[in-house]
Image (cartoon, rainbow, N blue to C red):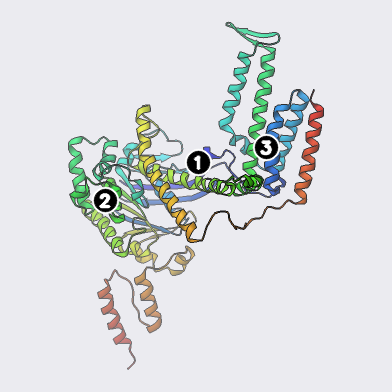
Amino acid sequence: MKSFMIIGQYVPGNSLIHRLDPRTKLIVIFTFVIIVFFANNSWSYGWLTLFALILVLLTRLRIGYILKGITPVWFLIFFTFILHLIITKEGSVLIEIAGFTIHEGGVLQGLTISLRFFLLVLVTSLLTLTTSPMEITDAIEALLGPLKKIKVPVHELALMMSISLRFIPTLLDETEKISKAQASRGVDLRTGSIKDRIYAIVPLLVPLFISAFKRAEELAMAMEARGYRGSEGRTKLRKLQFKSLDFMAMIIYVSIIIIFFSLRN
Amino acid sequence: MDIQFERVSYTYQMNTPFSYQALKDINMEIKTGEFVAVVGHTGSGKSTLLQHINGLLLPTEGQVQVGNFRLSRDNKRQDLKKLREKVGVVFQYPEHQLFEETVERDISFGLKNFQVPAEETQARIASALEKVHLSDDVLQKSPFELSGGQMRRVAIAGVLAMNPEVLILDEPTAGLDPKGQHDIMNMFYDLHKTKNMTTILVTHQMNHALNYADHIFVLADGRVHMKGAPEQIFSQVESLEEANLDMPDILSLMNQINQKFGTDLCYKRQKPDELAKEIVEQLRENKPL
């Protein structure tokens, strides 16, 4: 089951992208997600695609691995394409099969929307592939910092996020262990009617919840024992620091955006 | 049921950057009715190995033969449920798998899955409870209100109720106090003796391996590092050290006495009191008065 869980799973490395400050990466990706929606001709799409591909190459990860990582999304992309192909009725008719017509506009629309979708997923998966969850939460906490002024519990939210991220692999391991134990007692999750399969989840969920609650309690106790009192007066072990690499990346990124906007109609 | 591993290798998460080969070219044979211990350092592949015996994992290379079942990579479509009924597995911390509202229902869970006729269920539950030395009055309790040791016994009863021919124990004594460990190990040993149950004990407690096993397999780094009778294995001190394993207490005591007093004690399954007498005799003979 774990092999399905590699959507953007962090792969340690030492590429340029890995070394960027997580805040830089977050800002770039966040703005990229918005900018993708401004593309409106083949030049601007081409430019963004080129940018995304260069990013992919810079991560030094195996391309096959990245593409496999977004496997579950391929279906959605394909589905979007088909939907646009059938529904959009613009431009001249290209093919007509059994009452369905496929229009030129539909092909174009389908292609651009799926490309947009693909770019979004690809680039955001690069963030999680090259940035450890801890770095991401640190970056979010730092970027949301100003909200503390209006009494948003930023630190607590970031802590909750990092704890839940931290426990995903633990709980996955636990799930696997329990499901193996129950499989040894004859539970079969793969065959049988839907009703049977739903019932087969109960022996998995109950122990999982019990252990999750136990863990939560133990963790809270361990944190208190080590004097945790929330964000007040708390210093950081890993201090985020922009380096020259980040400034360079930012300058390049801004120029890419400027070129992009000049390419649009 | 005879168990045979033929050139078995297993790799986790094949074809990803996380791929990890846990077993490398394992060959081993376990005969019906044997008590076998599989020992090794953390990460040596013990747990991976045992999951091959009831088909939870299929070898990525080679094959495992368990009775009539032939488990290999290209032999996926077969009724593993039948195999799992015959091979009971007590996982590490088995109490974590309890989930039912009452002890009775939890023990009968496996029986239901393997379609044991309802008339037989009660008798099976009663005999399983007796095997783990629990009284009938826990049956209607929730498993979660029992003590840790009792919970473990209930979980073990759930496996024993299936009447397995092969019993696999993955560190069954982890987290128990010394008396609890002793009781549980003796219980498994009795079952092995009285029912002639093939028992495979995965452990890093050398004392248990020495006391109970007919045969020991030492794993190191995913390979079979040594195999043989306990006396043989534990006489090869250097090789054991290579695998990062300790000596059983009784043997390390004997070695120390031998070194210190120049005695010539050798292990032949003596009980502590017999050993004490032997030490006294040898010291008397050796003493240069």
Can residue B191 be seen by looking at this rendering? yes
Instruction: Say if B33 sits above or below A180 in the image.
Output: below
Chain letter of disc 3? Answer: A
Q: Are marks 2 and 1 on the same chain?
A: no
Mark 2 Cα within 10 Å, few/some/many (few <14, many 20+)?
many
In the image, B9 versus B119, the foreground residue is: B119
Mark 1 Cα within 10 Å, few/some/many (few <14, many 20+)?
few
Measured from the top left, where is residue A71 in percent x and y?
57, 32
Identify the residue under disc 2: B197
Chain letter of disc 2? Answer: B
Identify the residue under disc 3: A30
Closer to viewer: mark 2 or mark 1: 1
Q: Viewed as shown, does residue B286 lie left or right of A100?
A: left
**Which amino acid lies under the numbered mark 2 shown in the image of this protein?**
Met
- Which element is circle 1 on? helix
- Which element is circle 2 on? loop
Q: Are marks 1 and 3 on the same chain?
A: yes
Measured from the top left, where is residue B36 in percent x and y?
34, 56
Query: Which residue: 29% across, 56% down?
Result: B149
Question: In 3D space, how far apart are the residues under numbered discs 2 and 3 (Cα atoms)?
Answer: 62 Å
Q: Viewed as shown, does residue B62 lie left or right of B177?
A: right
Q: Are marks 2 and 3 on the same chain?
A: no
Can residue B155 be seen by looking at this rendering? no
**Which amino acid lies under the numbered mark 3 shown in the image of this protein?**
Phe
